[in-house]
Amino acid sequence: MNSDHKMQQKLRHEAKALLEQDKVDLIIGFEAGSLKFTTTPLITKSKDDLDRLVINPFIVNNLALFLPDFKGRIAVASKGCDSRSIVSLIQDNKVSRDDLVIIGIPCPGMIELRKVEKLTGKDRDELDDIIREGDKVVITVDGKGSEFPIAEVLSDNCLACEFPTPQDYDILLGEPTATSQESRVKSRESRVKGQGSRVQSHGEGGGLQSEASPDSRLQTLKAMSPQQRWEFWRKEFSRCIRCYACRNICPSCFCKRCFVEESEPRWLMPMPRWQENLMFQAIRNIHLAGRCTDCGGCERSCPVNIPLRCLTKEMYDLVDELFHFKAGMDKDAPPLMTHYEQEEAEDLIR
Amino acid sequence: MSIEYRVSSFEEYRGGRREASKLKTQNSKLVRKKDIGSVLHQWSKDYTIFVPCNEGDTAFTVHGSRLTVYGLWDGSDINLDWYRNTVTPPKANFLPPLEEMFRFQKGKEGHSMELPFEPGVWSLESGVPLPQLIFGIRPCDARALSLLDLIFTDAYQDPYYLPRREGAVLVGLVCLNPYDSCFCTSLGIGPGESDDVDLLLTDIGDEFLIEEISDKGKRLMELTAGLKDATEDDTARANEAKEKAYGRVTRKINTEGIKDRLLSAFEDEHYWEKVAAKCIACGICTFLCPTCYCFDISDEMVKKQGARFRCWDSCAFALYTKMPMENPREEKWQRVRQKVCHKFEFYPMTFDVIACTGCGRCIRLCPVNWDITQTLRLLD
Amino acid sequence: MTASDIIEKHRFLAQSNVYLPHIMVIEKIIDETPSVRTFHFNFKDEKLRDEFTFESGQFGEYSVFGVGEAPFCISSSPTRRDHLEFALQRVGKVTNALHRLGVGAEIGFRGPYGNGFPLDLLQGKNLVFVGGGIGLAPLRSLIWNVLDNRDKYGDIQIIYGARSPADLCFKYDLDAWGDDKTVDVITTVDRQESRVQSPVSRVEAGNSRLQSQESRVGAGDSRLQTADSRLLREGFVPQILGQVAPSAQNAIAIVCGPPIMIRFTFPVLEKLGFTPEQMITTLEKRMKCGIGKCGRCNIGNIYVCRDGPVFSYAQIKGFISSEY
């Protein structure tokens, strides 16, 4: 029985108890999705639904997103980044801590299906199975299993995660996750050789196109000249269709009315031109300064693969560098952009 | 301005056109896959050719998943063995995400207007001359265009969509490897459906079998040199492939009486609230739906020159229906209901056809796996 | 179709491009209330002035170039053809821009769109007009249409209300209809005291006389007044309608106003014995294209722009509770 399964059992048990003892009105967690290797939010008031709750490496959505939508007392399953988003919402007075029961999931990282697809050359629905075993993952295609280090397929934001264990919780479903970057990088170095005949092993340089570091894309971008970078984003944002999935999946984008939809004054045209698309993301990122917890939801949800995390992670790092601030760590702290400290001025205004 | 023509039903509208254009005897040819480039080359004299290609799979992007779109054919050889379907549906070739409708300027004599393109060149921005040939369109997406024809013809003819559409040639490609999110067979379309294309290609190994479906397709074939006639054996192999593909579509919905089920569920707020709870009200499922057509119109003016544009819009957005004092679809569940009912209740009421082709994009691309087939199944 | 066919087709459609507006010139502006203005306008191309025809209840898409387009009904009557009129409340981007325009300014216009009121159904009937606020605009097109063919119709009753005396639109019309002995006009306000006190919009104490605001171009007599006998009542339109209790016998009620008024008016009419077929309304929805393409104005499978905006209650009954 792996740890996900144990946590899943405990989650079902705890959720049931919370409803039975009338401690909450609503449970928000994950259930199996309708597609392979997919989960979907489970939002329910019914005890009968709780056996559908799951924990697996595909519970990618940041469930903090749903909290402002519902009234009453809510129990919410929460990974490290989700819990920080919840705290951030509390800081912004969007939800009240008293109404919440945070069921913490010490998070071992989420598997990025796009990486699996790149690794295997197959679409997700053509894969037989993806099984995580500790630091390894076994991907089965056409009945044949191949083993990879887990770091090959984890999301970039998970590889870079500083706080995989929830920062604030009422119930923790397992042992806190050993942090994080160091251990994962280490595991990457000691690649596991194949065991057993079913599993085919991939060694170093076995044609794998993994990233050297989770932020290598960002570093590549930073190494470009401004002209190159401008050209890069022009190209990327030419694809944007302005579906606003990046905004709507984001718990920090809680505004009832977004600046992009204001018509008086009209900040931005509603049409998908790259200039407008880029401005939309630029302004969105500024609004997210000190709120973004690097959950990776925006990039993951983008239907046209715009590398949005290159923007959000840069803002995340900037906030840390300029203000020594990490989003969603202290529910009693004021939101970053609502207060000012004297020593900030010198650094900020150049 | 009086209404020109009302479309009474899909069957009647398309039936007439199909009768006029469909061939009595279908003729089949054969082309080697590696010769497709030279065939496209011949066609490129008369058409602007769009082919499925991968975008965004650059060395830079960590995400390797295929971002397939219809792109301008660059004249090179193409291999479509990897190809399943595009992310952006081909409606974008006829109803672009953004298009300039006309330009205007204010001079001494007042305002004047002009269309932004030269005759024969549809859009200056892309420089794409008409007509288009879409190579490799899937049968579901070709059906979607037939469905869009209804709304853009009904009552008033759309002067942007229709000329593009009427000029275009659709070269279909049988869908041998449908996604697990596909449910086209429930909508009366199979992976080998030929009703909505001009030519239909089937991959039979090293070769494509080409079936002439319409007059347009036949004329195109007459202009094409270097094709072999297909044998009965080839046709048999193609039919077998189609049948196999048909069986691969395992996701199903029950369309029998669906209009009436939705009608009786329309006022069931509890049901809609429940199914809408996890929807994030983004525009993915509508923008990338091959049959969604809603658009917004907006103006832009710098100094004394400006233009009117139209761009895709979505019923998922709260502001879509917002009026100064009221918003009839303020709540998310009302907008989810609109989306579902528009496809499965209202379109059938108006045109006697469901405005869904089961392409599965809305399921496949949804960030929270909101699945319309599950929603509909709850009503069974 | 060959490339040259396409170009030909394109030329043809471009010439009759339904989205291309006509250029219109504003000839006169009347301030109806602090936020409502009536514009008199005409085709810049004089040829089109004679060719253009429309029906009461139809609407157009009006544009301020560079700002955008918005739909408003044509508020003048097709029986009075020397110019066209539309009236609008300042509520959003386009309406604000329109309110900033002066006489002589150019606007874009395309239309007429929609179905208009069913005149053949109305002929020979007693007509009960129920209007609220700026909802009188489409009704007044029909009322003048009917009055200009007075002998074709039965009794005419007009029940019109606004939030406050200052918010009553078309006061010059109310006066004119009040003077017409063949018409029964009942005017009501939600509150007698005007919320926004302005010197020209107060109700004169004692005789309940109602004054129009001074219109910018002075609509004839700039101090138009309601006739003495027209007492300004106090109460919501549906309430007053219930008190006035028009007979449903051989009658048709034509209702137009804010959605909330429409919602409360139908039950009152039903109580008075009007069948859903005897109730007609004209609906307002957010619209962009005006021709049934852009998608947003639907109620069920009906597009308000293409299939309406005039409907019988029987047509929209099923949807009215939850989507209107």
Image (spheres, rainbow, N blue to C red):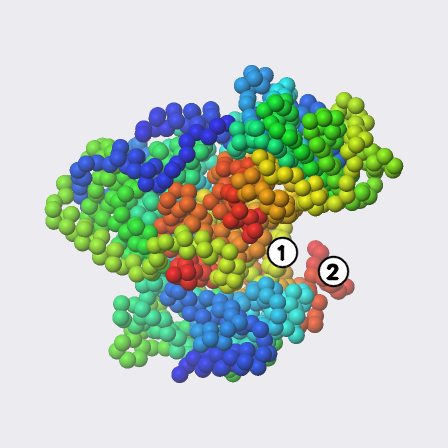
Instruction: Say if A316 sits above or below C273 in the image.
Output: below
Q: Is residue B117 left or right of residue A122?
A: right
Q: Position of residue A124 (x, y in %)?
A: 36, 63
Residue under mark 2: which chain is it in? A
| Residue wearing tag 1 | A256
Say what amino acid the circle numbered 2 marks.
Ala
Q: Position of residue C152 (x, y in %)?
A: 59, 24
Residue at the spot 56% in from the left edge and 51% down from the top edge: C321
Say what amino acid the circle numbered 1 marks.
Lys
Q: Nearer the viewer, residue C57 or C228?
A: C228
Kindly tell me whether residue B278 is visible in this rendering: no
Q: Answer with mark 2 or mark 1, whichever residue precedes in sequence.
A: 1
Which image quadrant for residue A93? bottom right
Q: Secondary structure at mark 2?
A: helix
Q: Secondary structure at mark 1?
A: loop
Residue at the spot 67% in from the left edge and 65% down from the top edge: A92
| Residue wearing tag 2 | A345
Instruction: Say if C249 sits above or below A69 in the image.
Output: above
Q: Nearer the viewer, residue C265 or B125?
A: C265
Residue under mark 1: which chain is it in? A
Residue at the spot 55% in from the left edge and 42% down from the top edge: C275
